[in-house]
Image (cartoon, grey):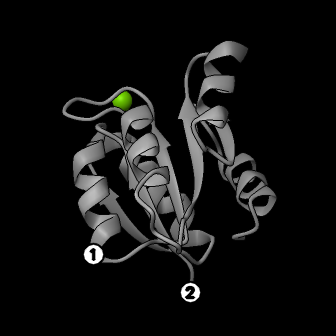
């Protein structure tokens, strides 16, 4: 079973994403901000991270930069979640080390396609 860490400050979004991912046979963990996500990764690296951009304490971008610079060999795939249909914004996330992005709100089919694209589903 592949492990997915959902990182989002919205409890509702985490709940929706968890439901979708569980139907796709993922083992799911949750974090409410980038700092919490980083400590979870340091405990046990997931296979894939579903990552929100705007969060308090530590943003998705800060988390991503820290993760990619951490020197961990077992780097997870990262799928960025964004509400902004802005190519410069998406490009910045991909440049920082995201593997894919998905527009919010996403449905099961869209998320499954993105997870297949990064090779975890
Ligand atoms: Mg947010």
Q: Nearer the viewer, residue 27 or 75?
A: 75
Quarter, ligand 1? top left
Going 61% across and 24% down the picture, which residue do you hit?
Answer: 92
Mark 2 lies within 8 Å of ligand 1 (Cβ measured): no
Q: Nearer the viewer, residue 92 or 110?
A: 92
Horizontal side of 87 relative to 51 (left or right) equals right
Horizontal side of 113 relative to 51 (left or right) equals right
Q: Nearer the viewer, mark 2 or mark 1?
A: 1
Q: Quadrant of the C terminus?
A: bottom right
Q: Is residue 112 above or below residue 121?
A: above
Q: Is residue 36 above or below residue 48?
A: above
Q: Is residue 110 above or below residue 2?
A: above
What is the crowding at mark 1: few (fewer than 14 residues within 10 Å), some, or many (at least 20)?
few
Horizontal side of 50 relative to 108 (left or right) equals left
Q: Earlier in the sequence, mark 2 or mark 1?
A: 2
Q: Is residue 100 above or below residue 77?
A: above
Q: Quadrant of the N terminus?
A: bottom right
Q: Which mark is residue 43?
A: 1
Q: Residue 113 location in percent, x, y?
A: 79, 54
Going 45% across and 68% down the picture, which residue do you hit?
Answer: 72
Q: Secondary structure at mark 1?
A: helix
Q: Residue 8 location in percent, x, y?
A: 36, 42
**Which residue is identified by label 2?**
1
Q: Nearer the viewer, residue 101 or 105?
A: 101
Going 45% across and 51% down the picture, which residue do you hit?
Answer: 69
What is the crowding at mark 2: few (fewer than 14 residues within 10 Å), some, or many (at least 20)?
few
């Amino acid at each position: 079973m592949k492990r997915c860490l959902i990182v989002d400050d919205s409890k509702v979004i985490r709940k929706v994403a968890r439901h979708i991912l569980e139907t796709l046979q993922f083992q799911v963990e949750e974090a409410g901000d980038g700092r919490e996500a980083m400590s979870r990764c340091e405990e046990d690296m997931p296979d894939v991270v579903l990552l929100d951009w705007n969060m308090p304490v530590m943003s998705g971008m800060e988390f991503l930069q820290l993760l990619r610079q951490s020197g961990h060999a077992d780097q997870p795939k990262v799928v960025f979640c964004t509400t902004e249909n802005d190519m410069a914004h998406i490009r910045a996330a991909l440049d920082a080390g995201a593997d894919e992005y998905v527009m919010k709100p996403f449905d099961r089919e869209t998320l499954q396609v993105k997870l297949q694209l990064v090779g975890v589903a």
